[in-house]
Amino acid sequence: MSGIPEVLKYTEEHEYVRSADSENEIVVGITDYAQGELGDVVYVELPAVGDSFERMEVFGTIEAVKAVSDLYSPVSGEVVAVNEALEEDPALVNSDPYGEGWMVRLRVQDLTDLDELLDAEAYRAIVEE
């Protein structure tokens, strides 16, 4: 899956959010556009389960051949899971950013934070500038 899926929410810093199976939980990753701009991902530094972050606080880094970039928490919340598969195969971010390349699962502290995120149309306008 690539492009800009309509069902997701986005940040201006190129993170996406999708609903998780549990109430008040979301899955966070970087967009297909972001992974394309970074190039081949070689390392992803993620937080520990139980860590908490405020909206737009840095929660980790992603390292590619071209650059190292910060990862921003789209909402305030607590990390309830991290994608451990990225330790062994960080290139999952390149090959399947919206699927197997997800990064963290957060328990959302304040659901109104989700209202601050961009829809697909607004995100598309940013990346097509």
Image: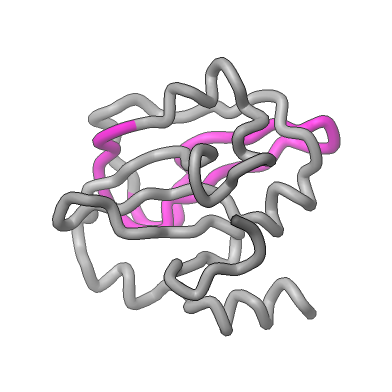
Examine the structure image and report whether residue 125 is included in the region drawn in magenta.
Answer: no
* Residue lying furthest left: 23
Q: Which residue is pictured at 60% across the width and 60% down the height?
A: 13
Horizontally, residue 69 falls left or right of residue 37, namely left
Where residue 113 sits, quadrant-wise, is bottom left
Residue furthest front as drawn:
1
Magenta: main secondary structure equals: strand
Location of residue 2 in the rendering, given as x and y in whole percent from the top left corner: 64, 58
The magenta span reads 54-81
x and y, in percent, of residue 32 in the image? 66, 55
Say left or right for 44 vs 56: right
40 w.r.t. 28: above or below: above
Image location (x, y in percent) of residue 37 = 79, 51
Q: Is residue 89 above or below residue 18?
A: above
Colouring mode (rainbow / by chain / secondary structure / one colour):
one colour
Going by the picture, which residue comes out furthest to the right? 66
Residue at image coords 49%, 46%: 99
- Screen quadrant of the C terminus: bottom right
In reply to whether residue 60 is colored magenta, the answer given is: yes
Say if 33 sits above or below 44 in the image. below
Query: Quadrant of the rendered structure where residue 121 is?
Result: bottom right
